[in-house]
Image (spheres, rainbow, N blue to C red):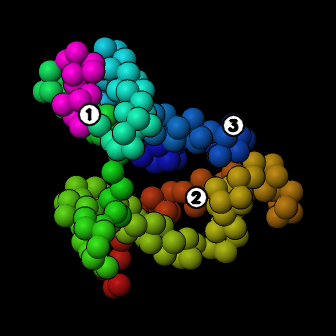
Amino acid sequence: LGLIRAIERFDMMKGHAFSSFAVPYIRGEIQHYLRDKGSTVRIPRRWQTLQRKATQKSREIHELFNRQPTDHELAEALSISIDEWQDVKLAYRNRSPLSLDAPMHEEEEGATSLGDLLPDSHYRSFQLAQEDRIRLQQGLVQLEKRTQQVLEFVFFHDLTQKETAERMGISAVTVSRRLKKGLHSLKQLMANPSTDG
């Protein structure tokens, strides 16, 4: 999404490299996603303190009795109810993300993973992005060779228009015209894909 916004707002007449223009847009979109969609669990300070004390108490019990303490022992040592201790444990367990590739049952080889059980709401948008990428590649090869080279130098190799002109042995004005023409052609090809797949 950030890349698409950067492409829409990029002004080739300014002569800047596309990558230096696009990076802030991409970074911003990632930050927005993490802020809006991220599932960070904020654990209350009291529970953080209880967890630290429980970890210390757990070590002590393990050293003394060579076993892990029960939930009842830890709740009693912390002077809290068993329900509150289980809430603290649950909060810490849910704080760390699960791997979607982890098998549900470790003893079974080729077992179903957590990711296999969850519907992927973003699959369709990923699929559409892949289709757009394919159409873009198909569109590029339909362009005139020199126009295609200009687009590749500017967008894939992050060269400025001036650097592109020097590499190709043409004027910066010609690069600008070919860039504008190529982007216009690609937009048309992307908007009206041919159906002769």
- Looking at the image, is 195 positioned above or below residue 170? below
Q: Earlier in the sequence, mark 3 or mark 2?
A: 3
Badge 3 element: helix
Residue 35 visible in the picture: no
Which stretch is magenta?
Answer: 70-80
Q: Residue at x 58, y 61 (%)?
A: 182
The quadrant in which residue 76 appears is top left
Tell me if residue 138 comes above or below residue 170 in the rendering.
below
> Magenta includes 72?
yes
Few, some or many residues within 10 Å of mark 1 (<14, 14–19, 20+): some
Left or right: 51, with 7 as reference point: left
Q: Mark 2 points at which residue?
A: 181
Residue picked out by circle 3: 14
Q: Specify the amino acid type for callout 2.
A: Lys
Quadrant containing the C terminus in the rendered view: bottom left
Above or below: residue 145 compared with residue 41: below
Q: Are marks 2 and 1 in contact (CB under 8 Å)?
A: no
Q: Identify the residue under disc 1.
A: 89
Closer to the camera, 156 or 164?
156
Three-letter amino acid code at the position of disc 1: Lys
Foreground disc of the pair 2, 1: 1
Identity, as a three-letter code, of the amino acid under mark 3: Lys
Q: Earlier in the sequence, mark 1 or mark 3?
A: 3
Apparent side of residue 103 relative to residue 1 in the rendered image (left or right): left
Label 3 crowding class (10 Å Cα cut-off): few <14, some 14-19, many 20+?
few
Q: Residue furthest bottom?
A: 196
Dot 2 lies on which element? helix
First in sequence: mark 2 or mark 1?
1
Q: Marks 1 and 3, how far apart in space?
A: 56 Å
In which quarter of the view is residue 174 placed?
bottom right
Residue 123 placement, left or right of 9: left
